[in-house]
Amino acid sequence: MTISAMVEGYRKEAALFQSDKLEVAEVVQIERAARDQGQWGRMAACYHPDSVVSISWIETSGRDFVAASEKAFAAGIRHLHQMAPTLVTLNGDRALAESGAAILLGGRIGGVEVMVTSHARMHARVERRDGVWRIARLGAVYFEDAMAARVPGETPVLDAARLAGYRPSLRFLSYLLEESGKTPSADLAGIDRPETVEAFLAAEEAWLAG
């Protein structure tokens, strides 16, 4: 094989590698955009049939997560996502994709309209099967959150004891989720418990390694 043929081979391999990374990043971004916009068929197409979703308010299959999201959307509950670029680590037909996100949740507390902003990092296991990249698992690491009244001058009255019972990395998120009838998870990865983040990331790396 000539040098020029070797170089061309490396170029083609690099192009395929970049193409795979772009496809992985796109499926992750499409899934969040579709959820925000109520495009349920488009969202469902991003998940493998045996996928798992484990986030603040639900742990279920990808298919059931889409159905639950559609039900919440129809009830007027909106969880919107401001997504940062997606970083992708490839290993053959497996990839880890992580994206910074600001999750916006609207709701009411004691008649006061509020908005919670939760800062997290979305982590997706993405797998290529039959030539198509789809999400095999979706989870998140939670950093911090904040709550504000939508109308200046109004103040939501919070139960201080109840608020203190939630974890610092997702306390306002948990409070608002419970107000809307959901049960917030207390076992998610969050920077207030570094060991949960270490275990979460170790599991992701182990999956990537196969």
Image (spheres, rainbow, N blue to C red):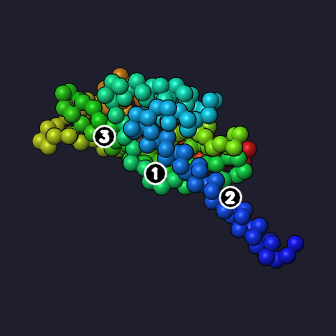
Amino acid type at circle 2 is Leu
- At which x and y percent is residue 134? 61, 40
Spatial CA span between label 1 and label 3: 17 Å
Label of residue 177 in the image: none
Residue drawn at (24%, 30%), measured in percent from left and top? 108
Residue drawn at (67%, 58%), measured in percent from left and top? 17
Label 1, secondary structure: give it.
Answer: strand
Q: In the visual, does 19 lie left or right of 5?
A: left
- CA neighbours of label 2 inside 10 A, class few (<14), some (14 to 19), many (20+): few
Residue nearer the viewer, 161 or 11: 11
Q: In the visual, does 206 lie left or right of 168?
A: right
Quadrant of the rendered image containing residue 69: top left
Task: Give the labeled residue for mark 2.
Answer: 16
- At which x and y percent is residue 183? 41, 25
Q: In the visual, does 54 lie left or right of 72?
A: right
Residue nearer the viewer, 111 or 192: 111
Amino acid type at circle 3 is Val
Quarter that holds the N terminus: bottom right
Task: Give the labeled residue for mark 1.
Answer: 100
Give the mark, 1 or 2, whose residue is nearer the N terminus.
2
Task: Give the labeled residue for mark 3.
Answer: 116
Q: Is residue 95 above or below residue 176?
A: below
Spatial CA span between label 3 and label 2: 40 Å
